[in-house]
Image (tube, rainbow, N blue to C red):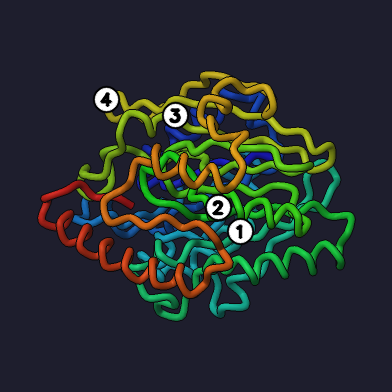
Amino acid sequence: MIFVGDIASPTASCSQDLEKIFAAQPAIFNGQPLVCNFEGLVCDDISPETNTPVLYNHSSVLPVLQKVNTAVGALANNHTNDLPEYFAATEQKLRQYQIAPVGAGRSKTAALEPVSFFDDGKEVILFNACWDFLLYHQSNPAKGVYVAEMDTLYLLEAIKRTKQEKPGAAISVFLHWSLDMETLPYPMYRQMSRAMIDAGASAVVGAHSHCVQGGERYKDGYIVYGLGNFFLPHNTYANGQLSFPAFSKMEMAFEWNASTNEAKCHWFWYENAEGKHQLTLKESSSFDNSALLKEYTAFNQLPPQEYVGYFKQHRRKRFLIPVYKDYNAVFKNAVLTFLLKGRGNVARLLAKYKIIKWQT
């Protein structure tokens, strides 16, 4: 199976570009199950020429995703409730194309329910959740649509329970977390990921930051902190205002065989030339031997306490940004998130008046 980052194809033309990307790499996208972060619901009624970053997917993307055997469309992200009135139709259309939605639902229980599928004959159970801060500008639920929020203690218990109930299945966790353009995982995320593997997960994969954040082996499990974008066209949404810096053009697809527990990294470089969106394969290698992965994970050998200092020294996002260290510090983290939401609302106001650029 292959995990990729954000899929947000707003037009039929963009979907054609995505189809060409898949077709150019038949050795990678060869029919094994694909899991994507489905960054925005299916909608053909609006255009990307809105003044705010409302993200969605044109229905033309669905046959493209079906063609490469997309098994799961993850909806636990901060754009599902941009257009919650399209949720029911999106769920229906995903299922019509044999793509299982996960991470959102008509109740909190439904949103938190994992999805099950098979990879190389082995059952895979996938949990999907979103960091609650990323929903700061929306109601959750919105119009009756719940996005699964990242409750670490709940997820740990759910993983343990699932491992007991289905000992032969492989468990994976796909999380929408971190801040835009932050190249390093929060110290708390390293702690969380390892705890999830200790609980019974075999792979923990992150998205949202729109840039690669590296990855590590822990015991027999794999951790990928940030895949980067996959197909989120630059200079397209928000009247062309939504763009990303050059370092975000590197993207990773994480290939993991649930049966053999072997993994690979496929590295792509994004280009936007004359309105066409392209991904060029830069490198494919095993997870353990990937030179690029080692470059992005210079902190690989650092123990948790030393990593806190490393993160403080090397992180990109600093101004009024707290450092989350421990997922067990529930009250402290809630206070930090409350303050961070205030900062986020100010940033959205500044972007609205074009004082700063939009972020997602």
Q: Is residue 132 left or right of residue 173?
A: left
Earlier in the chain: of badge 3 and badge 1, it is: 1
Where, quadrant-wise, is the N terminus in this rendering? Answer: top right
Residue at the spot 47% in from the left edge and 68% down from the top edge: 87
Q: In this view, does 274 lie to the left or right of 169?
A: left
Q: Mark 1 = which residue?
A: 96
Residue at the spot 47% in from the left edge and 36% down from the top edge: 212
Q: Percent from the top left, x then y, of residue 100?
A: 64, 58
Query: Of helix, strand and loop, which one carries label 2?
Result: helix
Residue 85 seen in the current view: no
Earlier in the chain: of badge 2 and badge 1, it is: 1
Q: Distance between the residues labelled 3 and 2?
A: 21 Å
Q: Mark 3 = which residue?
A: 250
Q: Mark 4 = which residue?
A: 274
Earlier in the chain: of badge 2 and badge 4, it is: 2
Amino acid found under the numbered disc labelled 1: Gln
Q: How far apart are marks 3 and 1 (CA)?
A: 32 Å
Amino acid found under the numbered disc labelled 4: Glu
Above or below — where is 278 with respect to 355? above
Above or below — where is 130 with respect to 122? below
**Viewer-nearest of labels 3 and 1?**
3
Q: Mark 2 = which residue?
A: 189
**Viewer-nearest of labels 1 and 4?**
4
Residue at the spot 26% in from the left edge and 38% down from the top edge: 235
Query: Of helix, strand and loop, which one carries label 3?
Result: strand
